[in-house]
Image (tube, grey):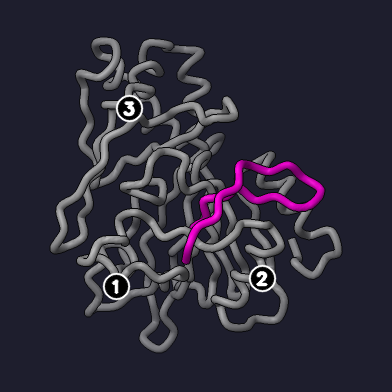
Amino acid sequence: MDFTENDAPNQLVRNLEGRGFAVVTMREPGAPDATITALSAALRLGSPHIPALYRYAETKSYSASYSDIRSDTKGRHPSFSTTAGQAWHVDGLLDDIGDIKTTVLYCVRAAHRGGDTLLFNSLAAFAELREKDPAAAEALLSPKALNRRSTLPAIDVDSTGPVFSVDEAGDLITRYTDNDTCTWNYSAGPPGGLHRALGFLRTASENPRYRLAIRLASGQALIFRNDRLSHGRQAYEDTPDARRHLVRALYANAPSTSDSTGGSRREEAS
C-alpha cells in the first residue's frame, strides 16, 4: 500500500484489524524517526512505549523511542546487533500480556541476503488447538505457564504469565514466545497439556496457513499487532558498506483513525 493514497490510514487500519499486519510504502524517504512519527500520527498510536526491560539503569542505553536494528560487532544486545535469526517472540519481555499492542518496523536498508521478518498467527493456531484439544489450550491460559528471563548482560530479571489470555474487551491476546528467554512450567494446567500444546504450536508455526515471511524494501514499513501475532527473523548477510538497517518503535495503543473505533488508548511518555 502507498501511504500517499488518500484513504491510506483507513485502509491500513482495516488491514490491521482483519489480518493483524500491513505493509506500507512511505512517501519520499526521509529521517526514519520523522517517517515513523508521521505514520504513528496517522494511525493515532500516540507516543512510543518504552518496554519495561529498558527502564532499568543497566538497560537505559536501549531505551530510545526509536531503536536501530543493525549488525554491530561492538554491540551487546543479543537481538538488535546480530545478523542471527530470531525465534518466535512478542515484544515486551517484562510487560504484561497485551500491554504492547503495536510494533512498527521501518526499513532504511534491506539485507544483502535474508533478513525477512517472519509472522506467526499464533492466535489462529490457538483457536484451532482449543477446538481439537481443549485441555492443552487450557494449559496455555495458566498464569504460571511461561517464564521469560532477560538475556541482556548485567541484568537478571524475568516475568511469568500466561501464553494466551483475554483482554478487557473480551478479545484473545498472545504472548507466545519460543526462544532462549523461555522456561516452560509443565505442571501448569491439566497434566500433559502444556507438552501437547507446545508440540501443536511448533508444528503450526511451520505451516504456511499460519506463517508468513515479509521482506521489506527501503522506505517500507511493517505494522503489526504485537498482541495478536508472534514474530521472528531470518538470519541475514550484510555487505560491509551497506548493512541491513531497520528502525523499531513500539506502542501501547492499537491503530485507529477518526473513522474507526480501534483498541483501547493509553498515553505513554517517551
Quadrant of the drawing holding the N terminus: bottom right
Q: Nearer the viewer, residue 8 or 242?
A: 8
Front-lying residue, 110 or 100: 100
Residue 207 x, y percent position in the rendering: 48, 35
- In the rendered structure, the answer to whether residue 194 lies left or right of residue 110 reads left
Asked whether 260 falls inside the magenta stretch, the response is: yes
Q: Which residue is mark 1?
A: 61
Helix, strand or loop at disc 3?
Answer: helix
Residues in magenta, as a range = 250-270
Q: CA distance from mark 1 to mark 3?
A: 34 Å
At horizontal 16% and vertical 58% (from top left) the residue drawn is: 155
Inspect the image, locate mark 1, and give the three-letter code of the amino acid beneath it: Ser
Q: Secondary structure at mark 2?
A: helix
Residue, far bottom: 241
Is 194 or 118 nearer to us in this picture? 194
3D distance between C-alphas at marks 2 and 1:
25 Å
